């Protein structure tokens, strides 16, 4: 009785392999001091677990709105931005109109479209990892998708696409979702468009700033758009503990997040320099908290060799245009050192 649409899906793959140094999921290496943990524990212990949480997460939305410089009416919160990607895939246009996104990119855009039986208009990035504008416009005019997902910066290539190209795609009449999951590392945004235009929304998340375990995604849109999306939100989708902990983290303890983000940006630059010194490794520029690099040796083999040395990175070499590429998240300085050492050692063993 299960529909073919669902049977044909493959589940979202996460990296569950154990390793001493895990640099595969683009998490922030935020370590909380003991007194902060204690304080969080105290607040969590006060939660009346038999009660439902605030369905609108009003206090949390107010705090996030202040961070973003928008009104809380501009926000819809999701159980991770993954949930918001689903909502948008359901809400925008009728299902006989397709979904456009450049590839390779974040897999949830494809998974959501497949789930709903919507056609997918996928266009490969050009050699420089930017949007191939000519090919994109050609495909858009031919297949008339109505929704575009743009990962900005793009996961897994780590770069922000050209703003002009994104605007040209939007001009073709597509409702454009700018997924800014990695905003804190790029500082580039379409937030102004999202709060003023009918055809643009921005997605943010707390996952990449040290709170992946809370599952809080943020949709920023004009009030009327946010109001519509809010109607389809599952009730109580932000759990009580998540609301409480996120409120603390975004107020009292936000300086810890900011310090960690700055550290990661510094470390990113250091790793890029170090990678470019390793013979047989070509790193790509990064606006994110991870780095894509191409290896002269087979990526499957290199991935295994790194794991043998205790370092887990993401093998993205099976994705279109990413032959022999791996993706590494920026971690703590000592984790990054361990990665660089393991990489040098692995490459040396092949010469
Ligand atoms: N968008 C992009 C581009 C991502 O890389 C990710 C996580 N890997 C997400 C969205 C999902 O984030 P969340 O944890 O908020 O669901």
Image: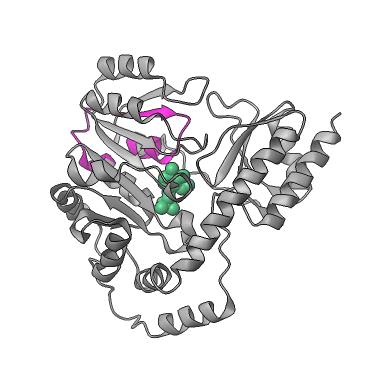
Q: Residue furthest left?
A: 224
Position in image of residue 118 (x %, y %): 29, 31
76 w.r.t. 55: above or below: above
Where, by quadrant of the figure, is residue 147 drawn?
Answer: top left
Which picture quadrant has residue 251? bottom left
Q: Quadrant of the C terminus?
A: top right
Q: Nearer the viewer, residue 278 or 179?
A: 278
Residue 2 appears in the picture as rendered: no
For residue 309, side relative to residue 80 (left or right): right
Q: Position of residue 248 (x, y in %)?
A: 40, 73
Quadrant in which residue 269 is drawn: top right
Please name the residue shown 68% across and 39% down the image. Answer: 273
Q: Quadrant of the N terminus?
A: top left
**Image coords of residue 197 (percent x, y):** 18, 40
Q: Nearer the viewer, residue 217 or 70?
A: 70
Tag count in the figure? 0
Image point (42%, 58%), residue name: 206
289 sits left or right of 134 in the view: right
* Picture layout, residue 127 above or below residue 156: above
Residue 292 point in image, percent of width and height: 59, 36
What residue lies at 48% left-to-right and 61% top-to-bottom? 258
Which region is colored magenta? 89-113
Q: Is residue 336 above or below residue 56?
A: above
- In the rendered structure, does residue 326 fall within the stretch colored magenta? no
Look at the image and tell me whether residue 281 can be seen. yes
Residue at figure coordinates x 68%, y 55% from the top left: 333
Task: Identify the colour scheme used.
Answer: one colour
Q: Is residue 171 above or below residue 41?
A: above
């Amino acid at each position: 009785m299960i529909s073919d649409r669902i049977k044909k899906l493959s589940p979202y793959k996460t990296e569950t392999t154990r390793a001493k140094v895990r640099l595969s999921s683009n998490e922030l290496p935020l370590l909380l001091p003991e007194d902060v943990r204690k304080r969080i524990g105290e607040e969590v212990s006060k939660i009346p677990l038999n009660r439902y949480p605030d369905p609108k997460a009003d206090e949390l939305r107010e705090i996030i709105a202040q961070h973003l410089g928008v009104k809380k009416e501009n926000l819809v919160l999701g159980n991770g931005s993954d949930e918001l990607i689903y909502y948008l895939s359901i809400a925008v246009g009728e299902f006989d109109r397709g979904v456009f996104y450049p590839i390779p990119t974040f897999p949830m855009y494809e998974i959501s479209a497949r789930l709903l039986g919507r056609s997918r208009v996928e266009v490969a990035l050009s050699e420089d990892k930017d949007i191939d504008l000519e090919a994109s416009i050609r495909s858009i005019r031919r297949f008339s998708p109505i929704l575009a997902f743009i990962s900005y910066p793009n996961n897994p290539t780590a770069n922000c696409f050209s703003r002009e190209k994104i605007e040209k795609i939007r001009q073709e009449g597509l409702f454009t979702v700018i997924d800014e999951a990695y905003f804190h590392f790029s500082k580039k945004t379409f937030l102004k468009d999202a709060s003023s235009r009918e055809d643009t929304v921005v997605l943010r998340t707390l996952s990449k700033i040290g709170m992946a375990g809370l599952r809080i995604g943020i949709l920023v849109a004009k009030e009327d758009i946010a109001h519509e999306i809010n109607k389809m939100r599952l009730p109580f989708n932000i759990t009580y503990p998540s609301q409480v902990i996120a409120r603390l983290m975004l107020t009292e303890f936000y300086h810890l997040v900011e310090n960690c983000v700055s550290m990661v940006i510094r470390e990113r630059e250091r790793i890029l320099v170090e990678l470019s010194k390793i013979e047989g490794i070509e790193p790509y520029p990064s606006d994110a908290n991870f780095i894509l690099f191409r290896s002269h040796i087979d990526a499957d083999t290199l991935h295994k060799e790194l794991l043998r040395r205790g370092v887990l990175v993401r093998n993205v070499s099976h994705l279109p245009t990413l032959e022999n590429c791996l993706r590494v998240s920026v971690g703590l300085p000592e984790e990054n050192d361990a990665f660089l050492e393991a990489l040098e050692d692995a490459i040396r063993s092949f010469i």
